[in-house]
Amino acid sequence: MDSKILRVTTGRGVYDLTAQAAAFVAGREDGLLSVFAEHATAGLALIETGAGSDLDLMDVIDTVLPRDDRRWRHRHGSPGHGADHVLPAFVAPSITIPVVAGRMALGTWQSLVLVDPNGDNSERRIRLSWVPG
């Protein structure tokens, strides 16, 4: 297995990692790309970007996991930070993507994104791991 760490500076939002992941698998044969967010308050998803889906996703997260401190037992950090710690149950911290002939086998409109609702932690580590097939 071969691994690489991406360091991503974020704020609160959705960040496209597709190009970095594509560069990591370029030139490899068939296999699997494992992507893992090394954080308790961020997740990964495959969504369409550039057409508003990223903003819609953040709106849904805010609806399902409101940043209302009265709801959360986990209370350290900024108001509503407890919601950030529940996010990985809905937007998983890991994802596996098939790779065929050195290219991720994504659908036409799919992009790999980091979903980060937590404005308290702006430095994220994403581990890309290549597993040959």
Image (cartoon, rainbow, N blue to C red):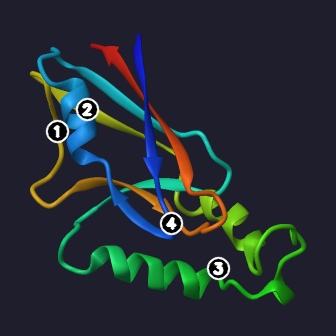
Spatial CA distance of label 1 from label 4 is: 29 Å
Residue underneath mark 3: 65
Q: Quadrant of the N terminus?
A: top left
Q: Nearer the viewer, mark 1 or mark 4?
A: 4
Q: Are marks 2 and 1 in contact (CB under 8 Å)?
A: yes
Among the 4 quarters of the image, the one containing residue 54: bottom left
Looking at the rendered structure, the kind of residue marked 1 is: Ala
Residue underneath mark 2: 98
**Among the two numbered marks 1 and 3 on one chain, the one whose residue lies closer to the N terminus:** 3
Image point (66%, 64%), residue name: 120
Q: Quadrant of the C terminus?
A: top left
Image point (11%, 17%), residue name: 27
Spatial CA distance of label 2 from label 4 is: 29 Å
Please provide percent x and percent y for residue 53. Answer: 29, 76
**Among the two numbered marks 2 and 4 on one chain, the one whose residue lies closer to the N terminus:** 4
- Element under label 3? loop
Looking at the rendered structure, the kind of residue marked 2 is: Pro
- Element under label 4? loop
Check disc 2: other Cα within 10 Å, few if <14, some if 14-19, many if 20+: some
